[in-house]
Amino acid sequence: MEHIETATTPDIPSIPLTDSVSIPQIGFGVFQISASTTQQAVEQALEIGYRHIDTAAAYYNERGVGDALRATGMADKVFVTSKLRNCDQGYDAARVAFDTTLANLGLDHLDLYLIHWPFPAVNQYVETWKALLELQQEGVIRAAGVSNFLPEHLRRLIDETGKAPAIDQLEVHPSFSQPETLRFCKDHGIAVEAYSPLGHGSDMQAEPIRQAAEAHRVTPAQVVLRWHVQSGRVIIPKSTHAERMRQNLDVFGFELTAEEMRGISALHDPANRVGADPATFVQSQSWANQKSRGNIPD
Ligand code: NDP
């Protein structure tokens, strides 16, 4: 890619994670984008104006992200997150996994590193967390966080290490917004990053969302993303279509009313999870495991 238009990039607010690290509130998620098309998708996202990319070792496309950062010369302008797989939990394994992630991305440090799942069945997440805290002290990760951690898992990290994660990346969308976990995070100063922020595409037909879209002359997806932004959450919508990628970044030109916000929040139903339940998720996330579950497209 020869040319990156930064002049037309909208101003994306940032959310503080530590005294010195802030995360752009909207990022581009690359789950289920194939290894062969990730470079192109990320280059397109950067051209459109994204400056925050969310990948994971378990997506098996970190190299594509790294290739895009190198090809565009934008590595130092982009906030990069990756995550540690379940099969790499434990202190020693986590250190090795981090080196592999860094090599795949071709970076000398990572902005944010997350434990992908608590994986309570093997009960190693506290030891894994200690490895992340050490990586942070060494300066190779700027911020340390978790994903899919419920209050009981977060409490153990805090009780046993004295250090809360900077952020918890959780499934949050209008029809499944996990109010108890969000409250715990707020009470403990943990930022929340919503994954599957559009409900994996499923939440857009709900009546309060359609009505707000009509009232503000925007799309239902923009209403949902605006609801997150006004709630103070980081979001990482994924799309492989340029027009949608643009739309998903363009949510700062309108404001939902308090009533509209309440109406959308009221859609929550604990039965509406689109991802796995962190309390019981026990997949290894090895390549073969991810492939067999349809998480790695050809
Ligand atoms: P999203 O809620 O982002 O939804 C993505 C789906 O919505 C795709 O089918 C996409 O289709 C469609 N879509 C995107 N934008 C629009 C739009 N403007 N209008 C209509 N449809 C749209 O779900 P994901 O599950 O993909 O999650 C996003 C990111 O969250 C992932 O890429 C990953 O980074 C992260 N994640 C993290 C998890 C974790 O365990 N930590 C688990 C799951 C996701 P199309 O691509 O065809 O445009």
Image: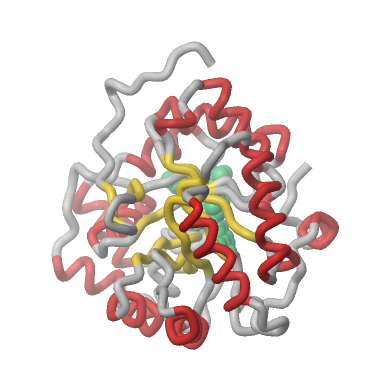
Residue at 16 percent across and 70 percent down: it is 259
Q: Residue 108 placed where, x, y %?
A: 56, 38
Residue at 47 percent across and 49 percent down: it is 139
| Viewer-side residue, 46 vs 207 | 46
Q: Residue 7 placed where, x, y %?
A: 28, 21
Which residue is situated farthest in the top direction here? 2
| Viewer-side residue, 188 vs 277 | 188
Q: Residue 77 placed where, x, y %?
A: 40, 31
| Viewer-side residue, 61 vs 81 | 81
Corner quadrant of residue 62: top right
Quadrant holding the C terminus: top right
Residue at 36 percent across and 56 percent down: it is 234
Q: Residue 145 placed where, x, y %?
A: 47, 64
Say above or below: 180 vs 166.
below
Number of numbered discs on residues:
0
Colouring rule applied to residues: secondary structure
Residue at 47 percent across and 68 percent down: it is 170
Residue 237 visible = no
Corner quadrant of residue 193: bottom left
> Viewed as shown, does residue 295 lie left or right of 204?
right
Say above or below: 79 vs 41.
below
Which residue is situated farthest in the front direction here? 138
Corner quadrant of residue 125: bottom right
Residue 185 visible = yes
Say above or below: 298 vs 119.
above
Quadrant holding the N terminus: top right
